[in-house]
Image (cartoon, grey):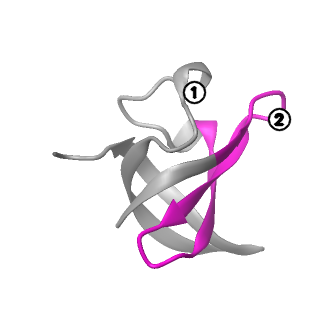
Amino acid sequence: MQGTIKRVIRDRGFGFIRSADGQEIFFHRSSLQQLNFDGLHEGEAVEFELERGEKGPRALWVRPAQK
């Protein structure tokens, strides 16, 4: 799936991605691939895999979007 970084909560180590279809998806810093958590910016394009977490959708294997 593709989306953009919506919000990064640095002190808690997680954030949210807005998917291309408008879903808000949780991600944890441990799911980042080829990305630095402290260097993430809102609006940055990413690709990811999706799974159902305990509290809703969760992004896995979050990586920079292919251009």
Query: Image quadrant for the N terminus?
Result: bottom left
**Quick one: SS at disc 2?**
loop
Residue 56, image quadrant: bottom right
Q: Position of residue 16 (x, y in %)?
A: 65, 54
Relative to residue 22, is residue 62 drawn left or right?
Answer: left
* Magenta-drawn segment: 7-29
Relative to residue 35, is residue 9 drawn left or right?
Answer: right
Q: Which residue is mark 1?
A: 37
| Relative depth, front residue between 63 and 53 | 63
- Residue type, mark 1 in image: Phe
24 falls in the magenta region: yes
* Total count of labels: 2
Q: Which residue is mark 2?
A: 12
Q: Residue at x 46, y 69 (%)?
A: 50
**Crowd rating for badge 2 (residues with CA inside 10 Å; few <14, some 14–19, many 20+):** few
**Quick one: SS at disc 1?**
helix
Q: Position of residue 47 (x, y in %)?
A: 34, 54
